[in-house]
């Protein structure tokens, strides 16, 4: 895990090395200062002249300036390294998620991925910052201060051997008690983020059903759960400070008691005032180092779970991979499904699609009708390898889709999903997702085909109109037409419309289908729809039922023989009007 995370340091290796090196230099300087102070105290006790005081004072001033400079430089390089490491980590995580298939996305919930990209990365960043600075400073300070204490205090330094184990044991018990709580709390963070995400995405539904109070209660419960765990952990960690103060005071009392006796008894021959002051300072440094180590230990414990969750995503291999020698050209838009069955997970007991056999010529228009849960969307998702068939093969242009380069295949298959998504930016920027190099004239032409040009020109800023995140400032029908125009700009060999005209009126739907017939006759068009009128003029209509193809035929053929098609048709034309 550490090796995997270390790979994200990359261009910040120099800063990551310089920070601990400078920290160690800072520690050496800080440990020399008490030594010089002791010499100054002894000189004053012996009745030295002012020149001696100036000399030692000057030395202390220089050492303090050097320590300050080292501290500033160490902080600078530490911040550079930690922030750069976190940036690379977020980048690698985001890029990894972009490579995931739908199967991988299904394994990690959206809220969990958001937590990993934000909270978890923040925790690991803090730990890395402590590692390249404090984690070097604390043990080095403790060892160096302990050594200097023995040099300056002789056998008096053995007092630390009594105090340090007491503090060390106490800090270890505190850290061990807090560790399990921090491990548990991140799963609750996922639940909290999930509550926020669901509420914001479904805000219109929340308000329509006047469920604001209930949603607030649900969020408060999740937030309270996280707060309780953190409160428990913080209460345990709060014992650090009083324990530290107790050990420091105990250390000072013991040193003052025995040190004073030794100075008085020997007249300063074995232990003088300068050594006494230095020993007190080194005692504080040693105990502070232990305090730092305890905080590092707790932080590393808390971030270890974050690191594991991050590496889990980084090590996840996409279920859909490019072949070793991919085909880089799609001959045409013909489709063949040969004995295709599919289930979303290997552990799933039931197949979503079963025994699908189908052949569609290039340029054909195919309608797909079926009830909710009949796997209409699942069927078309296999074409562009958003999922791979569990059994059998799906062929485009006579070639198994698993033999194509993924980018090549998906560039030739344009999908207007059931849940239309627009991104924040102008209408032009959204349309150019279909073709980044499209001219303004091509944008207008695609929008005319999708019956979107008219409403776009009614906006004050026209094609430069800003779209809010998720397309919240346009209607459902407008959003669908913009997504259709975006797909047309790809000039695909296969165009899939997944119930993507459900929010437009029947006249506009007919105009869009007419434009398809006249403008893209060589593109294979698959239209998933709930309305019979959206598919009745298709060359072929599939009737899906329970993950199987119940029947295939033209509108008239199915109307004559298929019960499901007849039932849908009569329910929509009841009373003489399709929408009755």
Image (spheres, rainbow, N blue to C red):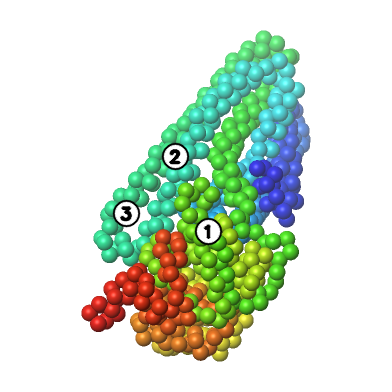
The reply to whether callout 2 and callout 3 are in contact (CB within 8 Å) is: no
Q: Residue 215 carries which label?
A: 3
Marks 1 and 2, Cα distance to the nearest angstrom? 47 Å
Marks 1 and 3, Cα distance to the nearest angstrom? 40 Å
Instruction: Please name the residue that numbered disc 1 is placed on.
Output: 341
Task: Find the residue positioned furthest to the left.
Answer: 575
Q: In this view, does 484 lie above or below 174?
A: below
Residue 22 in the image: x percent, y percent?
A: 73, 44
The residue that appears at 66% across and 12% down in the rendered structure is: 262
Residue 538 in the image: x percent, y percent?
A: 45, 81
Q: Which mark is residue 230?
A: 2
Label 2: how many residues lie within 10 Å, few (<14), some (14-19) or many (20+)?
some
In-image side of 340 versus 25 (left or right)? left
The residue that appears at 42% across and 87% down in the rendered structure is: 511
The reply to whether callout 1 and callout 3 are in contact (CB within 8 Å) is: no
Residue 43 in the image: x percent, y percent?
A: 74, 26
The reply to whether callout 1 and callout 2 are in contact (CB within 8 Å) is: no
Numbered disc 1: secondary structure? strand
Q: Compare residues 425 and 26 and report the one nearer the observer.
A: 425
| Among the two numbered marks 2 and 3 on one chain, the one whose residue lies closer to the N terminus | 3
| Among the two numbered marks 1 and 3 on one chain, the one whose residue lies closer to the N terminus | 3
Quadrant, the N terminus: top right
Marks 2 and 3, Cα distance to the nearest angstrom? 23 Å
| Numbered disc in front, either 1 or 3 | 1
Label 1: how many residues lie within 10 Å, few (<14), some (14-19) or many (20+)?
many
Q: Residue 34 carries which label?
A: none
Q: Compare residues 255 and 77 and report the one nearer the observer.
A: 77
């Amino acid at each position: 895990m550490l090796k995997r995370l270390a790979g994200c340091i990359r261009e910040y290796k120099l800063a990551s090395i310089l920070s601990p090196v400078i920290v160690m230099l800072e520690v050496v300087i800080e440990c020399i200062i008490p030594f010089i102070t002791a010499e100054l105290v002894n000189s004053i006790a012996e009745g030295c002249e002012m020149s001696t005081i100036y000399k030692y004072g000057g030395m202390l001033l220089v050492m303090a300036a050097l320590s300050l400079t080292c501290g500033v430089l160490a902080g600078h390089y530490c911040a550079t390294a930690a922030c750069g490491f976190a940036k690379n980590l977020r980048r690698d995580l985001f890029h990894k998620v972009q490579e995931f298939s739908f199967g991988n996305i299904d394994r990690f919930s959206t809220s969990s991925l958001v937590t990993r990209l934000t909270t978890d990365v923040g925790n690991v960043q803090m730990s890395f910052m402590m590692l390249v600075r404090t984690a070097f400073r604390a043990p080095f300070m403790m060892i160096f201060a302990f050594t200097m204490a023995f040099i300056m205090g002789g056998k008096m330094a053995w007092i630390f051997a009594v105090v340090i184990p007491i503090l060390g044991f106490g800090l270890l018990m505190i850290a061990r008690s807090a560790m399990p709580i921090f491990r548990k709390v991140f799963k609750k963070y996922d639940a909290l983020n999930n509550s926020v995400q669901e509420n914001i995405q479904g805000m219109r539904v929340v308000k329509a059903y006047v469920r604001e109070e209930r949603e607030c209660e649900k969020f408060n419960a999740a937030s309270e759960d996280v707060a309780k765990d953190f409160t428990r952990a913080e209460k345990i960690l709060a014992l650090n400070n009083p324990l530290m103060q107790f050990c420091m005071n105990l250390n000072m009392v013991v040193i003052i008691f025995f040190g004073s006796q030794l100075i008085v008894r020997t007249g300063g021959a074995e232990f003088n005032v300068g050594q006494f002051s230095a020993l007190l300072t080194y005692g504080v440094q040693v105990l502070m180092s232990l305090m730092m180590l305890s905080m590092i230990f707790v932080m590393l414990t808390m971030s270890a779970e974050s690191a594991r969750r991050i590496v889990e995503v980084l090590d996840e291999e996409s279920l859909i991979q490019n072949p070793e020698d991919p085909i880089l050209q799609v001959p045409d838009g013909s489709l063949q499904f040969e004995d295709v069955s599919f289930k979303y997970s290997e552990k799933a007991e039931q197949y979503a699609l079963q025994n699908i056999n189908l052949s569609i010529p290039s340029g054909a228009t195919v309608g797909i009708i079926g009830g909710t849960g009949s796997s209409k969307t699942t069927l078309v998702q296999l074409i562009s390898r958003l999922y791979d068939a569990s059994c059998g093969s799906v062929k485009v242009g006579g070639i198994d889709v698993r033999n194509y380069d993924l980018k090549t295949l998906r560039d030739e298959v344009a999908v207007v999903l059931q849940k239309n998504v627009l991104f924040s930016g102008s209408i032009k920027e959204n349309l150019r997702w279909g073709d980044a190099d499209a001219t303004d004239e091509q944008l207008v032409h695609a929008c005319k085909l999708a019956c979107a040009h008219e409403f776009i020109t009614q906006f004050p800023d026209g094609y430069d109109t800003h779209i809010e995140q998720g397309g919240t400032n346009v209607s459902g029908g407008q959003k669908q037409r913009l997504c259709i125009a975006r797909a047309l700009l790809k000039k695909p060999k296969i165009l899939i419309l997944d119930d993507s005209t459900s929010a437009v009126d029947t006249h506009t739907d007919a105009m869009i289908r007419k434009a398809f017939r006249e403008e893209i006759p060589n593109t294979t068009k698959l239209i998933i729809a709930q309305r019979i009128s959206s598919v009745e003029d298709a060359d072929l209509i599939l009737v899906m039922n329970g993950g199987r193809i119940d029947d295939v035929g033209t509108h008239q053929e199915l109307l004559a023989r298929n019960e499901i098609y007849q039932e849908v048709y009569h329910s929509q034309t009841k009373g003489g009007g399709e929408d009755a």
